[in-house]
Image: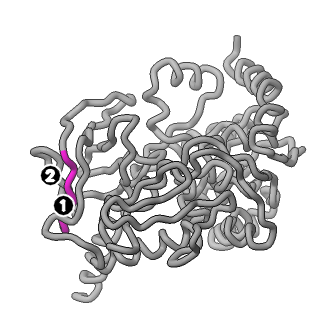
Amino acid sequence: MDKRKRHRRAWRLAYTLLHRHLEKKFNLTSDICDYDGPCLIVSNHVTNWDPVLVGLSFPKKPTYFVASEHLFRMGLKTKLLNRYFEPIPRSKGSSAVDTVLKCLRHFKAGDSVCIFAEGDSTWNGLTDEIVPSTANLAKSSRVALITYRFEGGHLSNPRWGKGIRTGKMHGGVVNIYPPEVLKTMSVDEILGAINRDIYENAWERQKSDPVAFKGKNRAVRMESALFLCPECKRIGTIKGHGNEVICSSCGHKVTYTEYGTYEPKSPFENIYEWDMWQKECLKKGDYVHGETLFDDRNVKLTEVLGGHKTKKITKDTLTQYSDKLKIGENEFLLKDISSMSIIQASILVFTCGSKYYELRTDKKQFINMRKYLFHWQNYNEELKNSSEGEV
């Protein structure tokens, strides 16, 4: 059977089998898009289910999704995904040239492609601004641009959380920009339009239309998002237990409610406020630390090779110093790391020189990898500022 016909059949079958179940599971409403030509769909990213949920609005023909490289290292699951849906691989932090070329080939063949342009699903309920390369792709694609937005998704299935909380969720098209309209727009104008269209603030929406998102163990795994205690300012002591967030060092405790807020509401009303505070403290060095800034035990270092193959290097304590990462006998100077990102909740990937690495723990162990990412970003910002000051 021709692979395109196989993709169409698989798409229709998946829609028939899944759409009622998912609508009930998420209490989801989806707008059906009737646009019939090839298009670039750009959506905000709020849950692990987003590719499937976007598909509910486009039942007529397959949409090809740009997907993280790690999905291509899952054995039989990868083979099935490739055979029936053919996602487009993108290694986070590496060159996107191959990904762009594959997208353009799909457009030329009359296909539609969907990109979650933030790169990562939101940690704190707000949409991040996208990078200009997405607007460049929209400009050069010669197909329609469709902007798509999820509402209520962060509280339905937070990136850091376990399980789905039933509340209210909606997904739908915001705007359709035909090719002839895109021709008249600059890249900056397209970028601005995408950022406006897909922007979602979970907390503003909750204030204007409060919804309870019901589920058990609502705070479990919150430690993969939060790393700094507001009471004792120690890193790595925060842990989610049931519906509570507790510091193992000083005993600071808050309850995570069905509305996504904390009780008591001081010092932070929601995870966004806590997240902004911890980022600022990390940047200023306003936390308990010594020469070793922070560390985590039992972390596995893997090199990701070509063809989605991997080579295990070591399993040891991962330690952050001011200017380097160290794990076992392996040291990586921060100035030599050209890119860094997080996959899922606690997989850190980075490029050092010409090599691409992955850091992760065992499946049952959830640690916070965000602190390593933020420190690397802060280090690069300081390096850039000091270089500009010397000019």
Mark number, residue 331 = 2
Pick out the residue farthest to the left. 329
In the image, 14 versus 209, the foreground residue is 209
| Residue drawn where x is 66% and y is 37% of the image | 64
Mark number, residue 324 = 1
Residue 9 painted magenta: no
Q: From mark 2 to mark 1, how far is it between C-alphas? A: 7 Å
Across and down, in percent, residue 139 comes to 66, 59
Q: Are marks 2 and 1 in contact (CB under 8 Å)?
A: yes
| Residue drawn where x is 30% and y is 68% of the image | 234
Q: Quadrant of the N terminus?
A: top right
Mark number, residue 32 = none
Q: Is residue 185 visible?
A: no
Residue 211 falls in image quadrant: bottom right
Q: What stretch is highlighted in magenta?
A: 317-322
Q: Up-down: is 386 above or below 105?
A: below
Left or right: 128 with respect to 92?
right
Give the residue type that dot 1 points to. Answer: Lys
Across and down, in percent, residue 349 comes to 35, 47
Left or right: 334 with respect to 254?
left
In the image, 152 versus 163, the foreground residue is 163
| Residue drawn where x is 50% and y is 78% of the image | 267
SS state under label 1: strand
Residue 204 falls in image quadrant: bottom right
Give the residue type that dot 2 points to. Answer: Glu
| Residue drawn where x is 17% and y is 47% of the image | 327
Across and down, in percent, residue 228 comes to 37, 67
Name the chief secondary structure element in magenta.
Answer: strand
